[in-house]
Structures are given as structure tokens and as C-alpha cells.
Image (cartoon, rainbow, N blue to C red):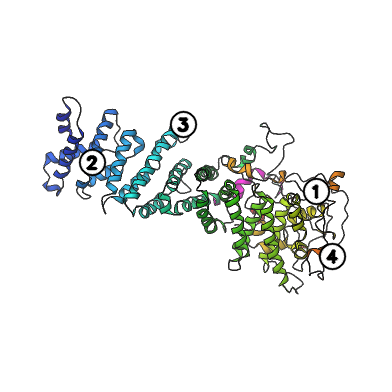
Amino acid sequence: MGAELMSNDMAEDGYISDSEAFDSVVQVLDAVRMAPSLVVQSDRDQYDALLSIVDPGKKMDSDKEALLVTALKALTGAVSKIDIIFHGSLLSNIFAMRIWNYGVDARNALLELITSLAAVPDKFLDGCLHMLVSNFLPPERLLEFESHPRFVVKKKEIHKQLHMALHYITDLVPLAPMKLKEVIDRSMPRCNDAKAKIVVFVECMLGVQTDDIGEFLGNLLMAKVVDLLTDLDVNITWEDILQEEQNKGIFDMELEDLEEDVDKDGKDGRKPLEDNNRAFKGNAFAEKLDGLMVVVCEHLKSRADDGRLFQEFGMLMDIFKRSVLKLHKSKFAQFIMFYACSLDPDDCGVKFADILTDVFVDKCEDPTSRMSAVSYLASYLARAKFISPPVVMRILKRLVDWCFDYCRFQNVQEKIINPKFHQVFYAGCQAMMYILCFRMRSIMDYPDLRSLLFHMPLGFVLSHALDPLKVCLPSIVQEFLRQAKAARLFNASVPSIYENSLESELSKAFGGTERLDMFFPFDPYLLKDSDRFVRPNFEFWSMVKTTYSNCNSEEDDEEFDDLDAPDFAENIGSYEDNNIGFESEDEDDLGYSMNKMSITPKPAFQFPMATDFQIPSRMPARIRPSVSPTW
């Protein structure tokens, strides 16, 4: 089938039949199937002509591509004649071919040859899988057109063909999935690669997960994606996020500022994300992470549409516990869990909350895992619109019960509490208060939930000698007490609170070097393109209706008149002998409006000072590393 043979065969009508092509290829392959010194020159020329037809670097017009299709089909029929030693050059050419360079017919012929080669026992499987995985990505020259409509169409076509080829190979070769794991592991993009390379490769790879082959691969593919997400995430520093805030106070980060007027789209009145996201412009890692989050969220959406999300979620939860739960540098990667839960609130959403609670109450888990889990839990229940008040209340009851049991078995005699020794307890208390800062008013709308809340032993826990109100973050304690007072949660007067600071020396102590006391993993999402998956189901602080909303109106004063608010003693049942008295506080005009989620601390202090309860409350949003140990 050399150049001379082809010209003789095609001279008359420019056409060669499939059978003639097959006979020519078999003849050429047989002629060089021996030691090179024994191959006659004419046969060598015929073989070289075949190599020139199957040349991965050759630019082809329509006639040359048609000849390539004929040669590939002939080779497919003659795979039994191909030898890994004597036909090494031919195999190298085949495995180096880029299907992105060819039309549909040539792509189909090439992939048919690859699947046929892969089915030959113990010979070509590795090379075939490498060839297919390398074609997850287009040639470098095409990557710059990654967002062009024509490229997008071709990308979908090629990815579909690659998935079908891998599917056929998996059906034919039982060992293929195991080999494919190794190939993908070696080919996986790294965080320093270009955004287009990362996005296109992962998009094709997750398509493999969607196919039946995903059952053989288990959670490997998604685990690789999550690892890449976290690698990109930890490379985004807090300085990158806050570089526009250098002229403000250390914690003066207004991430949820309200516009006085509704924005130009007539939506929710918050500043457009473009404004909040301005600090990320030019940040390569943030742009890569944003693009990758879009791909992962679209994959999860497709799984939900196919009715297979719950199966995917089980694998995702295992990966989360192993790779993300303890990663306190993570700022955005964890939102894949948030989005997955929003797609199936009744199953996935509830399961996520239950698993986090299980980790927290499990004595076999290490303290860091338990504190991280309850931080995730509190932030999740506070921010997830799709989690109903009854579910929130059920989880909250588990937290309160655990804290109550912890208090009962403590014999606190030391005058100075060591927060680090009881850090899991303080993490649980802070989580309870944080959840109620966001959810107390919505719970009050359910008479049965309201009654349950009022009869929880919150008073006993919060007034225990371990003194969680002094150890937990003052900003959270202050907001919780303000809402509890407005809701008449306790008939006893509220305790004195301390300086309006984001943190105290005690909260630093229980938070440890990881600063878990200041870890709010589902704080407002700042990535521009992928924000559309999170925002519809995300509860911003500016949206929260608190128990003291419109507190100056007479109607609001009457709103909670029917609440049967027990004293602390009633709240704790048999624990009425505990000392729970608090100094009375003036209930004059509160004198401020809390319409945003931000942080405005006063200078750090070593000795807490009692202050008036009417000091404005500031809820924590983002934490600057400049005042915290390096994570």
C-alpha cells in the first residue's frame, strides 16, 4: 500500500476498495515483520509510505484525510498482524494522533482502531488508554478558543466519542478501569497549569464518571477533582481577597454592604458580585478555581437530573471528610457540598447535617475534626435556605443535649478556666448560638418548635461554671443575647457582655492554632462565574429577619407577648440549684441598626470589661490572617 502501489491502484479512477486496502496493509505489515537487516528495500519503502499516511504531524486536505480513513480502517482489520516490536514506529504514530485535528469520519476510524488494539490481549491496552486520555485536551493552539461557540460544539462531540471508546474498551477488557485509574492519575492537570487546560480536562474526565465506567472507578475521579480544587483554593491567600481593603480597619470588611437603592437588575439590593469580586481580577488561582467550580457544579446538576445524585453524594461526602474537613485554608472548595445539598435538600441536605453532627458528638474522633465538623454544621445551617426550621431544630437539639450532658459531668473547681481543655464544648456552644443568630426568628414561627426551644436547657449550659459566654466570640455572643432578649427566650435578665470585639483572648485559646473559633466555612461566596450556583440558596445576613426586627414599633412589642418564656430554672429542669443569676440590664432604646454582616473590632484586650448591652453587634464574615496565626 506504498506510494507506488497506491498510485497504480488509484490511477484509473482514484478509488481503492476496502478489501484492496486491507490486502495491501497486511502485505506491508508481514513484509517488515522480521529483523531490519532482512527487510528488502522495496518493502521498507512500502512501510515508510504507510507511516507517511498515518502521520500525526501532517496537515491534511480532504483527499489526504480520506486516504487516512481508508488506511485506519484497513489497520483495524489487520490488528492481529501488528507487532509491538517490528511495527513500533507505526504504533507510535497511531498513539500520537490527535483526534481534534480530524473530521468526524477520521475520528471514528481512529477510535475504532484504538478500541480494536486495546482488545488484543496483553499488548496495546496501556498505549490505547494513554492515547485516549491525552485527547481529553485539544492541541495547545486550540485552547485559546476554549470559549468560542464552534469550539464548544466540537469539544462536546469529541468528548462524547472518547467516552464511548472508553466504554467499549471497559466492556472488552476487565482490567481497563484499573489501568485507566493509573493513566488519569499521571495525566491530571496541576494547579499551575492554564485555566483552559484544567477546565477542559476535568470536564471530559467527569464525563467518564457519568458513564457506567464510573462504577468501576469508584470515587477516584471526583477525589482527584476535589484535590485539585483544594490545591487551587489554598493558593488564594487572604491578602488576595482583601487587597482592596488595605485602607480600612483591620477587620472592616463590608462583604454584604447594602445599596440604598435596588441594583440595576432590580434584584436583592446587594452590590453586584463584580464589585465584591474586584479583588480577584488578575488572580490566576482564583480564576482557575472559579472555572473549575462551574464544571463541578454542572456535573452535579447533570447527576441530579439523571436521578443519580444521591449515589454521587455518598462518594462526595467520603471525599469531603478525608480531604476538606480539616483543611482550614479552604475558602471556596467546600461549596461543592453546599450546592450538592441544595439540589436534593430532603436527602443530601439533611444527610450532610446529620453526618457533621455525628462527627461532632463522636468521642472517637479527634478534637480538631470535631471542632471543624461543628463549625461546618453551624455555618451550613445558618446559610442554607433550603434546610427547613424543623431540621435545624432537630440538629440544634442534638447540640444542646450534648453540651448539657458535658456540663453535667464537669466538676469545675478551678477559678481560671482553661479554654483549650474544653475546646470541643466551647465549639459546640458557639455553634448553637451562631445557628440561632440566623434561625431564631424562623423557629419562632412554628409553635411546636418555639415550645421545644423554650424548654431546652440553654440557660443551664450558657450559665455553667465553664462560662461559654465569656469564652466564645463576643460578636456571636452579643448578637445571640440580643435576639434571645427580644424573643424573651429567658425571663431572667441577660448577662453582661463584653467589649464589641471580634475575638477575645479566651476565644483565641479555645480556637487553637487553627483558629477554629473563627472558622465560618460557608461565609459569603466571592467567585464570580460560579456564584450563580450558590447565590439562589444562600442566606446573607442582610436577609435575616431577627427577633428584634422593627424593634421600635408597638406591633413588634406585642409580637412575642404570647411566648411562654420560662425562667432559666424552668429551662433546666432539675438543675434549678445552679447559680444562674445575671446582672440586670437596661432595656432602653437599642440605638443601632444591624443591616450587614461585617466585622468592626475594637482594640484587643486582655481583661474583659463589662459594657452596655446596646453596643452595636457585628457578626463575623471573613477573617484576616494578619491578626491570626498563619493557617
Q: Earlier in the sequence, mark 2 or mark 1?
A: 2
Secondary structure at badge 2 equals helix
Q: Taking the image as drawn, is residue 566 in sight? A: yes
Q: Earlier in the sequence, mark 1 or mark 3?
A: 3
User: Which three-letter amino acid code belongs to the residue tagged 1?
Assistant: Tyr
Q: Crowdedness of circle 3 by 10 Å Cα count: few (<14), some, many (20+)?
A: few
Q: Crowdedness of circle 2 by 10 Å Cα count: few (<14), some, many (20+)?
A: many
Gap between marks 2 and 4 measured at Cα:
89 Å
Q: Which mark is residue 149?
A: 3
Q: Which mark is residue 548?
A: 1
Q: Which residue is mark 2?
A: 75
Marks 2 & 1, CB-CB < 8 Å contact: no
Residue 471, quarter of picture: bottom right
Which residues lie in the magenta part? 234-250
Q: Crowdedness of circle 1 by 10 Å Cα count: few (<14), some, many (20+)?
A: some
Q: Taking the image as drawn, is residue 515 in sight? A: no
Q: Earlier in the sequence, mark 2 or mark 3?
A: 2
As drawn, 200 above or below 483: above
Q: Which residue is mark 4?
A: 581
Labels 1, 3: front one: 1
Let me know if residue 204 is in the magenta part: no
Q: Earlier in the sequence, mark 4 or mark 1?
A: 1
Q: Which mark is residue 344?
A: none
Q: Residue at x 18, y 36 (%)?
A: 19
Q: Earlier in the sequence, mark 2 or mark 4?
A: 2
Residue 573, quarter of picture: bottom right
Gap between marks 3 and 4 measured at Cα:
69 Å
Residue 116, percent across and down? 27, 45
Gap between marks 4 and 1 measured at Cα:
23 Å
